[in-house]
Image (cartoon, grey):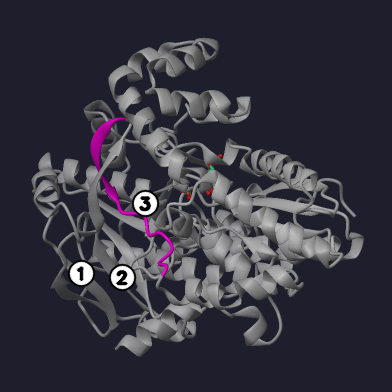
Amino acid sequence: MSCTSKISVLQEARKAYQPKLPGALKSGKFAVKELSVVEPPRDADEIKALFPNTFGKPMVQIVAGDGKLSTDAMNVGVVLSGGPAPGGHNCIAGLYDALMAVNPASKLYGFLSGPKGVFTGKYVEITAEMVDDYRNTGGFDMIGSGRDKIETDEQVLGCVKVLKELGCKALVIIGGDDSNTNGAVLAEAFAAKGEKLQVIGLPKTIDGDMRNEHIEASFGFDTAAKTFSQLVSNVCRDSASARKYYHFIKLMGRSASHVALEVALQVQPTITLISEEIQERNLSLNDIVNEICRVIAERAAKGLNYGVIVIPEGLLQFVNEFKSFFKDLEDLMRQHIDAIESMPDKDKYPFVTRHLPPTSSALYASLPVNLQDVLLRTDSHGNLTVSQLETEVFLIDCVKKKLDEMAKIGSFQGKFAAQPHFFGYEGRCGQPSNFDADYCYSLGYAGVQLIRAGLTGYTVSAQNLDAPADEWVLGGIPVSSMLHIEIRKGQPKPVIEKCLVDLKGGPFQAFVTCRDEWKAVDAYKFVGPVQYWGPAEVCDAPTITLELEGKKRKAAK
Ligand code: FBP
């Protein structure tokens, strides 16, 4: 064994994996076919006014055939944006291989540490050796990532300068809803300045919420959800073995509960909370705690003083009393953003309690210090940093108090001991599953064809993803057609609408059919780690979410 080798045996073997491409991309000759124009579902007039140069473009599909796309050498820049997601390196590999297949004199530049690498001109030229070292690996460490936004005119001009100096035809932004929105803003700014530079986005996020009928999945969701499923199922088995703890597991996913729902379908834990349902039913914290305690008491009566409770990371934003609290907090931020941001942390708490309306102020004051602290922080896109909210600890505390009350009146006669967990970073950089390895490589490969077709302000789209890779349909969707207006940091901003769990959709309905049984008796499924070699039904299976959504889509046709 060598102390300096950083390559595991699995990584070495995995380097040889050749990602599967969709049939249309395998042929070597492509055409980019124009389809219909799609309007944003809401706020179309506002979006059109904000994006006069890039609005109203058609969707496109990549088809086999000679579309007479340019075979000139071209230089392209790529940047990774936001949180890591398994498969990012394969997007870069797909971009690189497609560029070299078009013309080996092409160059790919990787901007370092996220979007600020573009306007500050921090980059590396991506070489064949680099790509080979990172093929089919997880993480974003090849060039790093960041959550900065390209916002000011100075930053846009910085991007123009750097991209032109490198002779780039296009910039590829690999990111989620906020980063693809930022890509659209940049594409519009370039077009408004008469610059020929193109911007293409690839849909990334483990949260699975950058999706719609044109983009059936964001990359990284598959591997992350399967990795979390393994971890949660291991905890289920421990719980059923030791029989002494309730495990409260918070799972990553900033807003939507797709990750929690997929894990529920894979593993069948005792209870899984789905934020979207809590919002729909206007449930309060008390309602949630009462339901958890009801299940715990009923299981205790059968001698089952253990179980596993899965909590989506963004839960609190969907709980009844917290919704008006967040609205009040947003108003307060809008009025006092500069004062709050420049204040030392110790002054923020009294300032906020003083300025919030009485009900929200009382709720805020009643929260544990960790929640008070984190609720005041947002990232550069105005998102709450929910990964730092100890919701699982907070819930344990609430459940414990309620069970003590129930014990006093004799309605709970069991034992309650709890363990908090947070699984998030454990899943974001996993070695990509075959699905993510194939999907990401295809996204990168398709991105190059959209650039060759001269498109800008597009995200690569992907359909039929529940079928084998050969049948996937790739193309492009104008980002402006996915935008709507949201209040961020107190201001109206165009953003890609997050896709939340559809309560009428196949995955949620499948969960509803079974969940009462999973609460009453243990039905844990032990899924094991992501597999790379073996039968296709084990190694290439899409998520249950994708499968059930695909079934519904096909039935509707
Ligand atoms: P992206 O939207 O950038 O893909 O990131 C998603 C996510 O993993 C969320 O699930 C999580 O809340 C957040 O990033 C954590 O952010 P950070 O990496 O800044 O702690």
Please give the name of the residue rendered at 39% of the width and 70% of the height, measured from the top-left corner: 216
Q: How far apart are labels 2 and 1 at the CA level?
A: 9 Å
Foreground: disc 2 or disc 1: 2
Crowding near pointer 2: few (<14 within 10 Å), some, many (20+)?
some
* Residue 519 in the figure: left or right of residue 150: right
Q: Nearer the viewer, residue 412 or 509?
A: 412
Q: How far apart are labels 3 and 1 at the CA level?
A: 18 Å
Say what amino acid the circle numbered 2 marks.
His
Query: Which residue bears the numbered disc 2?
Result: 214
Question: Is the CB–ligand 1 distance for label 2 below 8 Å?
Answer: no
Query: Which residue bears the numbered disc 1?
Result: 59
Please give the name of the residue rendered at 8% of the width and 51% of the height, measured from the top-left corner: 45
- Residues drawn in magenta: 490-503
Query: Which residue bears the numbered disc 3?
Result: 177
Give the tally of numbered discs.
3
Q: Nearer the viewer, residue 30 or 467?
A: 467
Residues at badges 2 and 1 in contact (C-beta under 8 Å)? Answer: yes
| Residue 504 image point, x, y percent | 40, 72
| Residue 25 image point, x, y percent | 38, 79
Say what amino acid the circle numbered 1 marks.
Met
Find the residue positioned furthest to the front.
Answer: 409
Residues at badges 3 and 2 in contact (C-beta under 8 Å)? Answer: no
Please give the name of the residue rendered at 65% of the width and 79% of the height, measured from the top-left corner: 539
Say what amino acid the circle numbered 3 marks.
Asp
* Secondary structure of the residue carrying numbered label 1: strand
When asked about the image quadrant of residue 427, the answer is bottom right
